Amino acid sequence: MSRQPQSWLESWVNLLFKLRWVLLIVFLVLTGFSYFPASRLAFEQSIESLYAKDDQHLLDYLESKKLFGGDEFVFVAYTVPGLLEQKEGKDKAEDQHSPLEEVRSFSKELSKIPGINADVSQNLADALSPPKLNFFLQVLLRRKRDELIELSRGVLIGDDNETTAIVLRLLPEDKSPVPRSETFRQIRELAHAHTPRAFVVGEPVQVYDMFRYVEEDGDVLFKVSLSLLAVVLLILFRRLRWVFLPLLVVICSIWWTEALLVVGNLQLSMVSSMLNSLVTIIGIATVAHVAVHFQALQRENVSRPAAIKQTMVELLPAIFWTCATTAAGFLSLLTSEIAPVRSFGIMMALGTLMVLIASTVLLPGGMSLGYLKAPAKHSSEKGLARYLKQVSQMNERYPKRILWATLFFVLFASAGFTRLTIETDFSKNFRDSSDIVKALDFVETRLGGASTWEVNFPAPPQLTEEYLERVRALSEDLRKVNPPDKTQLTKVISITDTLDFVPKKPFASDPVQSKLEMIQDLQSDFESSMYNSEIGRMRIILRALERQSAEEKLSLIHKVDSLAKKHFPGAKTKQTDDKTEAVHKEPGKAAGIFILLAYLIDSLLKDQLNSFLLAATSIWLIMSLAFRSLKLGMIAMVPNLFPIVVVIGAMGWSGLTLNIGTAMIASVSMGLTTDSSIHFISSFLRERSHGATTVEALRTTQHSVGRAIIYATCALVAGFSVLTLSHFIPLIYFGALVSVAMIGGMFGDLVLMPILLNLFYKDKVESAA
């Protein structure tokens, strides 16, 4: 920002101006070509990817999938009046139209859907009267029908004896003939067409809906918000050019970024779904400063070529340092242990670089096209000028009062940090009117918990009665885990439940093994889904309510895990002739996607403090380098830290929980609020270098840069208000909180920044005197 770089900069700008038409045409053509690879950008739809590879919860889940085949179940639940009614002496035709036979028929229809493992689908009709049984088992099931109903209670039949569920097991994704999206579409299509309507739940469905809403809503809302931004920009600048140019910079930046991501074999994820929105913020804010500066020069009767060159000369350094600090803020996410978070940091740094390139090569040509004259000042602009003048006067008259009031407000907001909570109820990510929430309400009020998880523990190569007694004891303790006034764990399914139901075979040499053989006839996959004799591991399947608070859910997981470790504490040793041999090394533990979803936000937050501190330090150093002053760099940080404290504190005080959309709000906000601060200080220093006093420089900057800050903030807040229409609650939170951060950053730049700069430069004058 000294004189020597300015002359080099002027030469560079002159070259850009001479080549403006070539650059404009070339980059528009490149943008057109970039659309095709950009449209192929894939979306990573895996919960596992949102965990560090060495995260213990993830390792436990993956181990369980390997041992027992995973619990990717879909439940189709509905009400059947007279479900258990039996009529004596009914003929074969009547039997085929009985409620249970209709359940069996619907189950067969659902099992034919591609992607479903038809051999292991479960329904109440097959549980009470399995087809193709030998005479002995048929007699047994008729005699023990009531016991069998109780075994199925909470899974295949509700307490009202009218609600039933069909349990469908999904094929692994790599073995499914169709994508999961098609499987779920067909399941829902049959469920909605069924009379009465059936409801579809299950963790795989919930996860799919989450990613679907993020992808679909993100795309639609981005287009709608761009349209709204165009309207707001037209109102503010009253020229179509200043509508098309910002949108062109944004669209080019996004398409170039997405095309490069495809080339680099990167994918969007839940974390990086906000990429387009954040690039929009950076692009719109950048062009807003250029538009205000350019129009101001035109109103001073500066010729268009001269105004273009002067605007680029005076603003390009600020644009460069703005993009550098923003990129540094996002690159701090590379310290994360979670791959999608690291990828998001790279994507945003790349997107920021694309904004810098797009602004540099497109704006000179864009500003040169056609007839362009600055509009006369509108009454609203005059009103804005009066408002900014009043703000300047207030800053000059009451600096200490404002600083003390701000400090008090920051301390008050900081106290809200202690009230922050993490959202673990996965259904809270969706609107109450969504299909998934309605389905969860139906299942959890009529059938029991919609979430499936487990405890697994060491097991011997061959089951014995002594060992099974330990399993029974653990099962009983798990059934007592609910607090007196609350149901959290709704079902405990143990291998002993079914073994105790089946009678012993007379003269069997191994009663346990003979029972397992009988169970094999009833349900072919039962033993393998509960017990892995080769590895030496058994599990108890649990059903729990999804719709419960974070404290309740995490407390339940802790209690269940503790019980598993209490009954199966792990490593034991036995002495052989020449060595001590370890037996059953791993203790009992809780595992499952229920736990992954419960700890999802905790996983995303785990290393955010380190990323935030690194971002703050990097941005401060870059700002200090840009202004060649550590103290100025520190002053520039104040308005950038202020909105972060306000946003996070406001979340605590208002009771908003940390969810997927807000888990990284501190790091994201830090990367977004530097733009206006750098432009403000750059303009202030430029005025000072022209001989203006501190007060004069601040007033001029407040009038010029202040208008650009307000215009950009108004446009972006209006655009991001569209996110409140999303079906996905975290996107709503994200839009609202980013808007608050932008408004907080505007206050910091227009109020705190001038006061701090005035104090700093006044001190310099006094010390020099």
Image (cartoon, rainbow, N blue to C red):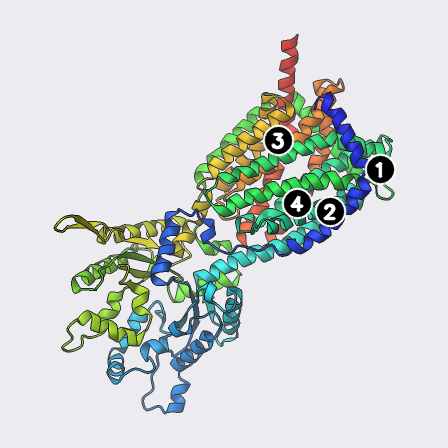
Image depth: mark 2 or mark 4 in front: 2
Image depth: mark 2 or mark 3 in front: 2
Residue 248 circle label: 2
Say if mark 3 contacts mark 1, CB within 8 Å. Answer: no
| Residue lying at 44% horizontally and 41% vertically, measured from the top left | 606
Badge 4 density bin: few <14, some 14–19, many ≥20, Cα 10 Å: many
Calculate the distance from the C-alpha at mark 3 to the C-alpha at mark 1. Answer: 30 Å
Residue 748 circle label: 3
Left or right: 319 in relation to 481: right
Say if mark 2 contacts mark 3, CB within 8 Å. Answer: no
Q: Earlier in the sequence, mark 2 or mark 4?
A: 2
Above or below for 245 versus 196: above
Calculate the distance from the C-alpha at mark 2 to the C-alpha at mark 3. Answer: 29 Å
Above or below for 178 versus 578: below
Q: Earlier in the sequence, mark 1 or mark 4?
A: 4
Query: Where residue 516 sits in the image (x, y, percent)?
Result: 24, 71
Query: Where residue 524 sits in the image (x, y, percent)?
Result: 32, 73
Query: Where residue 676 sits in the image (x, y, percent)?
Result: 66, 33
Residue 280 circle label: 4
